[in-house]
Image: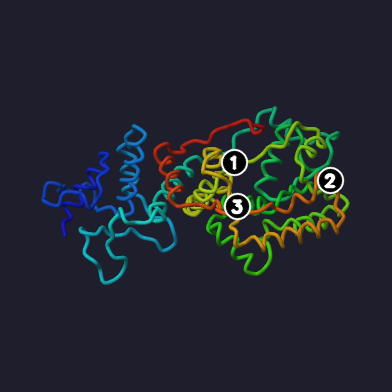
Amino acid sequence: MSRGRAWGWAAALREGSTTRWQEWPADGTGEGDAFRDDLPGAQQLGLLRRLNVAAEGAGRRVPLATADRVLAAGVSGRGRSDLPLIGADEPGRFGARPVDPDALPDDELLRVASALIADDVASTAHDPEERTLVERALGVRRPWVRAFRVVGVQWQAEYARQGLIAQGHRPGGRRPTAYLLADDLATVLAHAWTARSFDQGGTTWGEFLGSSSAFGHLPPRADLARMARSASHKYGAARVTIVLDRAALATELGVRRLQAPPVLGAHAVDLVRRVGEPLGLLVDEADRPRLLRESLGRRLDGLGGPALTVPRPREAWLSAQAERTRHELAAAGYPVLGDLDRLVPGPLPAEPVVPVDAEVLTLALGLLLDPVTATTQEDPTR
């Protein structure tokens, strides 16, 4: 066992080396002195080497301060700890056995990367700014604006509400019409998991689908019929409108269009899900969704590959739930903007689009090279 060799490799990684641990000289020429109290864990060393590879591929160099952050980082995940380095640490009677950093799965490296990105997201927290006179004016309900509420899948409804307020159409008023934003059920499920990833994190895409399909029902966040019943109890069935044509709703409310959420690919949503867990230890739970939307939501807009799709083995369950939803909404007699047939998805792709750890790690490395360190104020109607 050579701790000096391990310290020499760690020092080289700090300086930008991309050499693998098993390729590091073992003849004594690669020895080095300790530059901190404890030898970094295998996950941290493996992540820094991968970060150096990514930086080199982009013609860049990892700043020394960033390298030190990686080496000193914790590991996200309940009950997780640093893994010892094979060839430098003796196997203990208890705990994890030493490992080769380059043999670690991407999921292990993502545990460290997620904790670092969570630190960056937490640093973007700021006190609410005093609203300008224009913002205050937009926040006041106009008596001539139709009384309305926007409900439905949170990922769509939240951004639509924000955009309407920015255009001077504040939800509320007496006896409002509740507009329930809907879509084909496969898209609704993807949006429901996206919203959950920003709010709670934790559950993977496969677990999100599996826990409901096993019992033959929909997740509450994706159950449009349930949402419509809830809105009808609150506002009255005659004042609940199912919206499958957003352009028609924009016309009805007197705006050009509804604001859409960021377009996040499958890998981007999974990265948000992972970062949300350690972020929950750094900020108030109520602040977590907002910070993730204002930082990662904006930063990852348009990234992360294609949108999520439901895997083929879930097709029978998906079709049955879509037909049930369409039947329940039609039977209830709610007014509809658009066509209820749109609730039924088309054929699912043969190769599903699901999060892939390697692609998620690539996004995470980009966020370590160019950290999210400040919230970006943008036009909410963009």
Q: Is residue 162 above or below residue 32?
A: above
User: What residue is rendered at 67% in x and 44% in y?
Assistant: 158
Q: Residues within 10 Å of mark 3 (few under 14, many from 20)?
A: few
- The residue tagged 2 is 176
277 or 19: nearer the viewer: 19
In primary-sequence order, the first of circles 3 and 2 is: 2
Q: Secondary structure at mark 3?
A: loop
Task: Identify residue type, mark 1.
Answer: Val
Would residue 256 be found to the left or right of residue 78 on screen?
Answer: right
Residue 269's place in the image compared with 100, above or below, is: above
Looking at this view, name the residue that lies furthest to the bottom: 93
Residue 283 screen position, x and y as percent: 51, 49
Question: Which residue is the site of mark 1?
Answer: 263
Q: Which residue is mark 3?
A: 349
Between 8 and 316, which is closer to the camera in this rendering?
316
Label 1, residues with CA under 10 Å away: few <14, some 14-19, many ≥20: some
Q: State which mark lies toward you, 3 or 2.
A: 3
Number of the front mark, 1 or 2 = 1
Q: Residues within 10 Å of mark 2 (few under 14, many from 20)?
A: some
Q: Position of residue 229 (x, y in %)?
A: 80, 58
Q: Secondary structure at mark 1?
A: loop
From what the image shows, is residue 333 above or below residue 61? below
Q: Secondary structure at mark 2?
A: loop
Instruction: Give, as a three-letter code, the residue at label 2.
Output: Pro
Q: Residue at x 32, y 39 (%)?
A: 65
Q: Quadrant of the N terminus?
A: bottom left
